[in-house]
Amino acid sequence: MNPLFHALFQKSRYITNCLNEVLKQHNLYSSQWTILYCLHNHGSMTLTQIWKYLNVEAPSITRAITRLEDLGWVLRIDGEDKREKIVTLSPYAEEHLPVITKTILAFEEEMVGALTVEEQQQFMILLEKMKG
């Protein structure tokens, strides 16, 4: 078995756990932040677009969106087709995202600070070369 996969899984879990600790101050989890980040970068999206983009099962996204809606981070509005729901950031989210972004940027710098810019670019290239 290739030890690369074990190392990737372990590092992924480690980063997720660390990010969850950092996001506690904002009452968010990494899975919720991923959705907020997605909506911030891509604008309003349907539930289907979100789960396809994030490569996460539809029920997981629906539960996370419901929780974010209950917390006031997102709004869910009817699309052209009544069955379609459009998810958008709420005014609350728009107001608080800059502070969360500062927290995330500091976290990211802590995680990759030991890597040069060139090493980070090479790492991205290698990740993109992997199938998937």
Image (spheres, grey):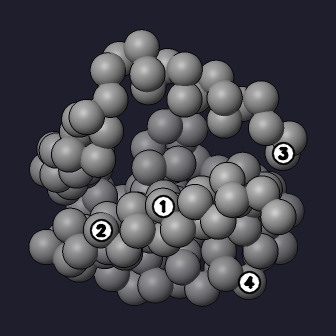
The residue where tag 1 is placed is: 11
The quarter of the rendered structure image containing the N terminus is bottom right
As shown in the figure, which amino acid type bears the numbered disc 4?
A: Pro
Front of the two marks 2 and 1:
1
Q: In this view, does 42 lie above or below 20?
A: above
Q: In this view, does 7 lie above or below 118?
A: below
Q: Earlier in the sequence, mark 4 or mark 2?
A: 2
The residues tagged by marks 4 and 3 sit, at their Cα atoms, a distance apart of 22 Å
The residues tagged by marks 3 and 1 sit, at their Cα atoms, a distance apart of 18 Å
Secondary structure of the residue carrying numbered label 1: helix
Front of the two marks 4 and 3:
3
The residue where tag 3 is placed is: 132
Task: Identify the residue shown where x is 53% and y is 41%.
Answer: 43
The residues tagged by marks 3 and 2 sit, at their Cα atoms, a distance apart of 25 Å
Callout 3: few (<14), some (14-19), or many (20+) C-alpha neighbours within 10 Å?
few
Secondary structure of the residue carrying numbered label 4: helix
Picture coordinates of residue 50 (x, y %)?
68, 57
Q: Earlier in the sequence, mark 4 or mark 3?
A: 4
